[in-house]
Amino acid sequence: MDLRTLLSDVVAGHRLSGEEGVFLLNTSGRDLYRVCETADRIREEKVGPVVTYVRNQNLHLSNICKNLCRFCAFGKSATDEGAFCDDPETIRQKVRLAASRDVSEICLLSGVNPEFDADRYSEILSLVKKTAPDIHIHAFSPDEVNHAATRSGITTEEVLVSMKEAGLGTLQGTAAEILVDSVRHVICPAKVSTAQWGRIIQEAHGLGIPTTATIMYGSCESPKDRITHLSVLREIQDQTGGFTELVPLSYLHQNTRLYLEGKAPAGATGREDLLLVAVSRLFLDNFKNIQASWGKLGVKLGQMALLAGANDLGGTMFSDDVSAEAGAGNADFLDPAEMLRMTNDIGRILSRRLTNYTLVDDTFPGQS
Ligand code: SF4
């Protein structure tokens, strides 16, 4: 396979096959820059120079989790030291704090608490909505939807309907990790299967609930597994158009069992991080938005990802206990002023957005 020919075919509109995607992910040396440059060109054609971010806040409501995935250092058993589950008043206080920070989006991030059923999820959503009616709620994963359905003896579609009625705006495309069952068996055996994840996501899209798409790469999957994962996402997007963006999540290894037991390397390399973003831009021809996840990559590599096909910096977050527990430093809050420094430095335009990528147009007037 000739790299230059393949990249020029992609620019001309060729849809990459799985085999071609794997070939691109295996690029090394200065060819890496050729792949990134092509991804950057396609990003420019598709979305122009604007780099978006959303002013949001993560709320961690419980770290008690039935899954205890091997790649995660956040989830705990109920009897573990440091296990917590917020009561309604604590949730209210956290939501009020988020509202005082002028966020347009609240992300509810928790473990899959074994005690939660469909009613409990809806009660939480209603509480958040009642406390901050104007803030968009981006919450829960297909795995939590599946857990709620099992606990309550109803279908996952019924859970989604009740979540939507209670205030859910968008569902998180988390719990995807790597959508290859043999990999899931090693890193997150208690989670929904690939087929279940895809079905629940499509049910959400069918009900008018958009979702993000994620990929958690850099643990023990192969380049072929990464492309298989992207193929699942591309196929769903062809059918529903319901994914708002891809959020690549680089595996943070330090305090995770998977790494400590010698079953995974110390995360992805910088080459792999940039290529994952670039090849996602090239492979996912039906996605508009690809995120540079500064909480996982750090600010400097995150900036480079903006030159490798990414067009979004995600959220301000304010807190990210999931990354912090896994050993990430400075994963809590990125000031939009620092985002502006990152984007000015590479000749791009920063703009605040809402969850659905509507631009908030009074941001940073006069930026260079
Ligand atoms: S990744 Fe999510 S589901 Fe898995 S252990 Fe961590 S909190 Fe629980």
Image: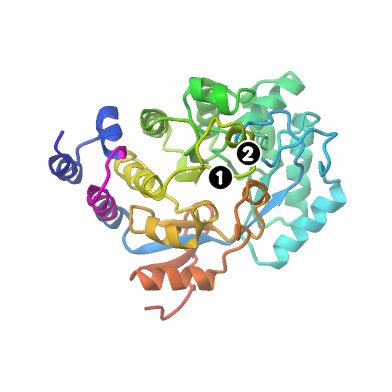
**Nearer to the camera, 216 or 51:** 216
Is 171 rendered above or below residue 336?
above
- Percent position (x, y) of residue 258? 59, 33
**Near-viewer residue (143 or 356):** 143
**Mark 2: which secondary structure?**
loop
Q: Residue 132: name its quadrant.
A: bottom right
User: What secondary structure predominates along the stretch shown in magenta?
Assistant: helix
Q: Can you identify the residue that label 2 sits on? A: 256
Q: Give the mark count.
A: 2
Range of the magenta residues?
25-40
Residue 53: x and y, percent? 50, 60
Quadrant containing the C terminus in the rendered view: bottom left
| Residue in the image at 69% along x and 42% along y | 74
Q: What is the secondary structure assignment of the residue under circle 1?
A: loop
Q: Is residue 124 left or right of residue 260?
A: right
**Magenta stretch contains residue 59:** no
Quadrant of the rendered image holding ligand 1: top right
Find residue 252 and name its label.
1
Give the Cα separation between the discs numbered 1 and 2: 8 Å
Residue lying at the far bottom of the rendered structure: 366
Within 10 angstroms of label 1, few (less than 14), some, or many (20 or more) residues? Answer: many
Q: Is residue 166 left or right of residue 241?
A: right
> Percent x, y for residue 28?
27, 44
Amino acid type indicated by mark 2: Thr
Amino acid type indicated by mark 1: Leu
For the residues bearing labels 1 and 2, Cβ distance under 8 angstroms:
yes
User: Is ligand 1 closer than 8 angstroms to the Cβ of mark 1?
Assistant: no
Which residue is painted at 47% across and 76% down in the image? 364
